Image (cartoon, helix red, strand yellow):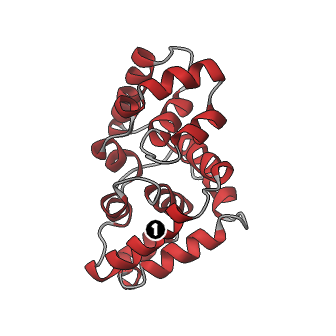
Amino acid sequence: MNAARVTAVSAIKERVEKLVSSNIKDSDCVALALASTFPRDRDEVFGMLLSNSVCKTALKHADELAMTQAEWNLLFGKEGSFVSEGSARPVASDRDFEPYAVSIAGALRCSLTEVASKEQWQRATSKLSCYVAMHTDYAEDWIASVLGGIVKADTRRLDDVRSSIEDNDTDCMLLSKTVLAMAQCVT
């Protein structure tokens, strides 16, 4: 692991051990930090990631457990390095994920004309990261971090996609698989 990634994962693990349990592996700590950023879907995703007793404790401390902007940038931003993208590929190619990827790419149509952003978007981890970002209150900032920036003309379309995601029932199974795959990529 590179030093920045190790630092970010260690900070997350330390929070989880202090607030929830010391018996949670690194990848689950990162998944928990990601799921903690979901203002609407965290209860359901926590329920899929954790046992009932650990889930109750984690929910009490969700805001404190949430991944920070700096941690997101280090782990999933454009300059982030992954141990492996292997766990991300099956989720990114899943037929249930495809409509979300198409919607997000459509919303980012101006940004994805930029060579660097288009190259980033081709990575499975970038697609998953953008999907996860859409479930947070930091969608624009986190997606900009993943792609290396976004064209302002895309922000309204991103808001529309995010509203659509909020208005429809979240596929919590897909969101949970996505969070776990992303966490495994950085640990």
Residues packed near mark 1 inside 10 Å, few (<14), some (14 to 19) or many (20 plus): few
x and y percent of residue 187 in the render? 51, 36
Residue beneath the point at 60% across and 51% down: 175
Question: Total label count?
Answer: 1
Image-based side of 35 in relation to 78, left or right: right
User: Is residue 57 at all visible to an observer of this figure?
Assistant: yes
Residue located at (29% from left, 69% from top):
149
Q: In this view, does 122 lie above or below 175?
A: below
Which quarter of the image is occupied by the N terminus?
Answer: top left
Coordinates of residue 75 in the picture (x, y in percent): 40, 46
Q: In this view, does 133 lie to the left or right of 87?
A: left
Q: Nearer the viewer, residue 128 or 49?
A: 49
Q: Is residue 187 something that shows in the picture? A: no
Q: Quadrant of residue 48?
A: top right
Height in image: 172 above or below 65? below
Q: In this view, does 187 lie to the left or right of 72?
A: right
Q: Which residue, as the protein is rendered here, is positioned at the far front?
A: 167
Indicate the quadrant where residue 5 lies. top left
Residue name at image x 37 percent, y 67 percent: 147
The amino acid beneath tag 1 is Ser
Q: Is residue 11 above or below residue 145?
A: above
Q: In the depicted view, which residue is nearer to us: 178 or 44? A: 44
Residue with the mark numbered 1: 163
SS class of the residue under badge 1?
Answer: helix
* Location of residue 43 by image quarter: top right
* Above/below status of 6 relative to 179: above
Q: Which residue is drawn at 55% across and 33% down?
A: 27
Where residue 62 appears, x then y in whole percent? Answer: 42, 31
Q: Where in the figure is residue 53, as x and y percent of width and height?
A: 61, 18
